Amino acid sequence: MLSEKTINIVKNTVPLLAQAGTVVTEHFYNRMFSHNPELQDIFNMANQRSGRQQFALFNALAAYAQNIDNLAVLKEALARINHKHASMHILPEHYPIVGGHLIGTLKELIPEQFTPEVEYAWREAYALLADICITEEAALYEHNKNNHGGWSGTRQFVITKKQPESALVTSFTLTPVDSKAVITHKPGQYLGIKVKPEEAQYSEIRQYSISQQSNGENYRISVKKELLPAAGIVSNYLHSLDEGSVIELYPPAGDFFLRVNNKPVVLISAGVGQTPMLPMLQTLLSDTSNQAVTYLHACENAQQHSFNQFLADQAAMHERLNYYTWFNQGGEGADFIGLMNISAVAQQLPLVDGDFYICGPSGFMAAIKQQLLALDVDAERIHYEVFGPHQAL
Ligand SMILES: Cc1cc2nc3c(=O)[nH]c(=O)nc-3n(C[C@H](O)[C@H](O)[C@H](O)COP(=O)(O)OP(=O)(O)OC[C@H]3O[C@@H](n4cnc5c(N)ncnc54)[C@H](O)[C@@H]3O)c2cc1C
Ligand code: HEM
């Protein structure tokens, strides 16, 4: 428990953080990577360059300081962080390093306001937050280690099948080198994948949603090639690997997964945001209920339309599945042309009681969320996953 004094001091520091803005987190990361360069093997340096990770950490710190006397409101945000950390095997011994650089940063950036009393309060507050994270992450590690097919840290997997799904997306079936079972994942969860491309200075970890239902033997991921120059370290490396190549995986993680509650479900994706939807769809269609399922998918054109045959087959086999597609650039094969407009199918949607799962670029998800809210869908029934550091829509 934190004292009243500590709570007040930390809360009073929020405006200082807000004034300093992301300068705090930028300084923090520069400081940490110069003192602890080994951590560049864990952090996604592309997210550092684009500023997205700085923004996510900054928001988390400000939210923590603001809610330090009511941590329950941060439960969801903390769970998301804990799962992301677990997908990269962040360990208790990392926390004092991060805490030390955080305190060092505040001392260096706001020396006048960061008095010994303020420093003491922040040390206490960080220790509490670290403790919460360490405990939650330990539970995830225990689960991963002790359940059938589970493991701890990295495990070697061989690419047993490489299947192009469209012009940009290729699926990889990943089977453990030891040929033993793999732990079950919840539909929608992702894997942390660790690789070291020859030209990269550090190991790289990225998350990829598992694009098929659990089968106990292998996982499948489906990866989009990044076309921007100088980007795509891991995705393009994966595309360059042949069947038979070996990569390292951390166990499944992630708090974006299908809630099984017998309510009608609407899955909504754009581009490679399809991946978490596929195991959700398989799970929904393989249950014995007769619950309606709707899948709405948007992509640029027919060439970029992944899994089309699979989805058309599912729609043909299951009367309770309604499947609608949008091609932004037009062309044959879609139900609608242009950007996804939910009102075109609103009459078929369970707006009053359904659960809505969204995945795709942030702009797409924000637009869809607004459309759903305008149709009176409660925010609590809208779930989404960002393929990068989390952003509020
Ligand atoms: C939970 C989760 C699930 C995911 N699931 C999938 C999935 O199923 N399929 C999939 O394909 N991807 C998925 N992703 C995304 C994936 O993890 C990677 O982010 C993606 O493959 C790009 O990584 P990369 O190493 O190829 O590209 P990076 O080299 O990391 O580049 C990625 C982006 O970073 C930016 N960038 C890079 N360098 C710079 C620079 N110098 N300056 C400014 N910006 C820069 C660019 O915008 C670039 O497009 C998921 C991500 C998360 C978090
Ligand atoms: C209490 C302290 C910490 C807080 C508040 C915190 C917060 C966060 C947040 C908000 C994210 C973004 C999550 C998302 O993807 O949405 C994140 C990701 C991450 N954190 Fe932490 N973290 C803490 C400690 C640590 C420690 C000790 C390490 C290990 C050195 C670490 C390593 C990482 C990494 C590698 C990522 C992913 C970065 C990326 O993909 O760009 N964090 N953390």
Image: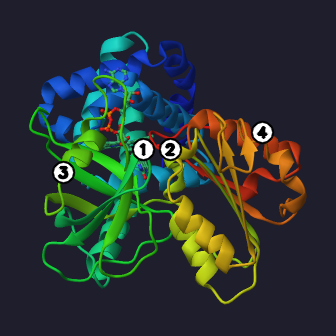
Mark 4 and mark 1: span between their CA atoms? 30 Å
Q: Residues within 10 Å of mark 3 (few under 14, many from 20)?
A: some
Among the 4 quarters of the image, the one containing residue 31: top left
- Residue 167 badge: 1
Residue, disc 4: 370
- 1 and 2 marks in contact (CB < 8 Å): yes
Write down the residue under mark 3: 241
Q: Is residue 131 above or below residue 264?
A: above
Between residue 2 and residue 327, name the one nearer to us.
327
Residue type for callout 1: Ala
The answer to which of 145 and 115 lies nearer the viewer is 145
SS category of the residue bearing label 3: loop
Amino acid type, mark 4 = Gln
Q: How far apart are marks 4 and 2 (CA)?
A: 28 Å
Could you say where residue 185 lies in the image, as x and y percent from the top left? Answer: 42, 72
Bin the neighbour count of mark 2 within 10 Å (Cα to Cα): few under 14, some 14-19, many 20 and up: few
Please give left or right for residue 70 compared with residue 319 in the image: left
Mark 1 surroundings: few (<14), some (14-19) or many (≥20) residues within 10 A = few
Residues marked 3 and 2 touching at CB (< 8 Å): no
Q: The residue tagged with tag 1: helix, strand or loop?
A: loop
Q: Which quadrant holds residue 254?
A: bottom left
Query: Which amino acid type corresponds to the residue marked 2 in the rendered image?
Result: Gln
Residues under labels 1 and 3: Cα distance? 17 Å
In the picture, measured across the screen, residue 121 lies left or right of residue 326, that is left
Which of pointers 1 and 3 lies earlier in the amino acid sequence?
1
Q: Which colour scheme is used?
A: rainbow
